[in-house]
Amino acid sequence: MELEKVNRLPMPTWRYLKTNDSQLPFAMPARPAKAVWSDASYLTAGAALPENFEGASPAWKDAAASGEAYTVRIPADEKVLLRADIVMDAASPDYAGTYVFRVEKGAELRLVWSWKGGGEAGVCALAAAYELEEGAVLHVSAAEEGLSGKLLCTQRAARAAAGARADFVSADLGGQTVITHSRGWLEGKGAVMHEYGLYAAGGRQVLDLFYHIDHTGEETESDIEVKGALSGEAKKVFRSTIDFKRGCSGAEGSEGDYAIQLDPRTKNISLPLLLCTEDNVSGNHASSAGQIDPGTVYYLMSRGLTKEEARRIVVESLIRPLIDRLDESLREDVLAGVRAKLDAEGGEP
Amino acid sequence: MAEERKKSRIDDVARSIYDVKDAVEYAYKADAGLTEDVVREISAQKDEPDWMLEKRLAALALYRKLDIAPWMPDISELDMDHIDTYVRPKTDMKARWEDLPENIRETFDRLGIPEAEKKSLAGVGAQYDSEVVYHNVQEEMERQGVIYVDFETAVKEYPELVKPYFGRLITPNYHKFAALHYAVWSGGSFVYVPKGVDVKMPLQSYFRLNAPGAGQFEHTLIIVEEGAKCHFIEGCSAPRYNVANLHAGAVELFVKKGATLRYSTIENWSKNMYNLNTKRALVEDDGHMIWVSGSFGSHTSCLYPDTVLAGDRSSCEFTGITFAGKGQFLDTGSKVECIGRDTHLSIHSKSISKGGGAAIYRGVVHIGPKAAGAKGAISCESLMLDNESRSDTIPDIIIENDNIDLGHEAKIGRIPEEDIYYLMSRGLSEEDAKAMLVRGFAEPISKALPLEYAVEMNRLIDLEFEGSIG
């Protein structure tokens, strides 16, 4: 399969480490499925991504553009719940789509992306731009099931005006290769953006996660938090950047990357960048990596649990707060998916 | 709503004793630029063995082949065609300060080196431009078998010790400026501490670059044998000129089984200096490497002390502070590679930026697949004193096995207003309050230094605050 460089770090570092970007498989979606929307009345055909939409790479942006394209407009002050179900089967194992979401002044959109497949190989490429006007609220939940043979690339960019708030919560359980590229611009005063990602990766899964939020507006707030477990020979790369631009006085941003490694063959790479040209800000980063604390496992086993049950409880306790941030319709399936993954040898369901 | 605080303007100030320029006098100066003839001439001037000339020429070829890393700060004003790579001062090496020419002796007197030697050092080396002009070590050290000599003497008198180690840890292909170093290196220090010897007082090498438009390329090699202990202090400064100066030294440190080496640096190059220095340590079983690093000077710095924890239960600590003022771009940090089992690392980095200066922390911790049992903590704190400046944190953490325990935290922000107001309510001016809080911020680093050097570091911080306007 063709290889493509993705998720380039905005401030590169030593080349010999080979972590400035990732070279991962790429293919064009050949037989794409169609998304089924819970309410299509908000959709109009065609979508023009903003010029500065970067995507994971130009090729992945083109891959997304090769499929369906819609603009979704949520009128001012309306509250809308939308769900997109994308079911890929043997006849249509791929997906390609480009979307522009415009959440107008004071409107609120709760959006659910539900991805399902039957384990067959395939390619999914999604590009979505979210434009939030003043006071708009956006909550996006995404989860997938049965995509173990897929190459997944989710690309998004969000721009928030004054008082707007965007929350993205995604659960990555399947996908042979998962590429996430998320870009945010907090432009208006008091704009807020949260990125929450949870994962349970096993087998030879590769997760390549990229988050980059620019603070330009005053008193803006960002939070990037990614938690999960790696087993088998799984590899996770976390590239996260919070950039406090000059003038974003009073801004606060934090980023966290917490990984439990359940197998000596796992690989865990973390690049949490904090960039700053404004003094009146507060930026924080915290991360931890390592095995499950043996003392905790021993304690739980002394209470009658098996080693596997104890291990599962510890991992669940790490990611449960993020599962709870998902749309309610997805939570049970995600929790069941995490459990199935942890119960399987090497993390392979 | 966040209250906008009135900004202080902090002026650049004269750097007092460090900026005093001596008349530019030399016994020999190589042609400016970097050619094969220049490299051959440096080697001939030093009457070197053939193997060293061959190494120089191979490094020159490599320098021409390697590119400048794309992530590096802009060094386009550094024109190698105008850098004097070798300037030999008008004196040979002395063992008594009073035997040095008056201007050179006065320079080191101003910097307090002879005084420090009397009070608290077991040995001193002083380099002026391209050559070491003073070297002395206490007799007691020599009786214990400690070797502390200038590097050229080591090449000639201890080839059996130098040859196996020289260029082994920092190879010429490590990066472009490492290749440059090996092509034109001159001066530096060699330290050998025999098995089990505890060098109780520090050894110090001080590097002074006086000639405008010159480069300094000293090589430091320290071997601390099994169970031995040593503290080495490196100091450097230069007067300010309107042309670029270059420092591309190399420091290779070998910490054998159960040995401990502390390497302390107070870097205070002038603000026309490009400081592209390279430092690397190899630590064997149960060995312990401690870096204490203060980066205050230079126009542009790229400095990332690198520790290879090759041995089981080997460990390292890095404690560093970077203070970037007007016109400075200081890209500093640390590298740790864990290879042995049950290694331990601790990185504690602080930076302060003001007046348009840029302080960048760049680091990597790589825990390899066989480095089971590795434990570590990384902490980076950045203080922004105004919004003309820049402060970035670029860590890279690569973990290739599960049996590890690593935590990392980073913070960025300004001095808490309530702390300033509290001190002002106690009668301090805003500048005094800020200076006090910055000294407090830097305290973990100053505590890791010997008293005389902690005093120097605090003086440097004070210098940066002099002339401030509220």
Image: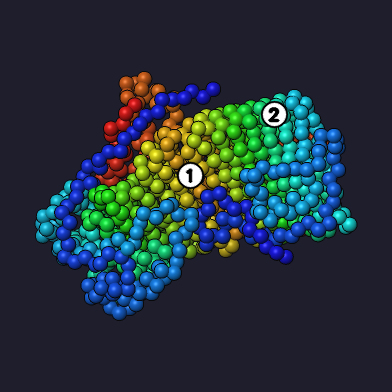
Residue plotted at (39% across, 42% down): B357
Determine whether, in the image, residue B333 is placed left or right of residue B372. Answer: left
B346 and B169: which one is in front? B169
Image: A72 above or below B75: above
Residue B10 visible somewhere in the drawing: yes
Q: Position of residue B460 (x, y in %)?
A: 29, 41
Determine which quarter of the picture holds residue A286: top right
CA distance separating discs 1 and 2: 31 Å
Dot 1 amino acid type: Asp
Determine whether, in the image, residue A190 is placed left or right of residue B268. Answer: right
Decide: few, some or many residues near mark 1? Use Cα within 10 Å; few <14, some 14-19, many ≥20. many
Residue B200 visible somewhere in the drawing: no
- Residue at image mark 2: A136
Decide: few, some or many residues near mark 2? Use Cα within 10 Å; few <14, some 14-19, many ≥20. many
Q: Position of residue A38 (x, y in %)?
A: 86, 37
- Residue at image mark 1: B392
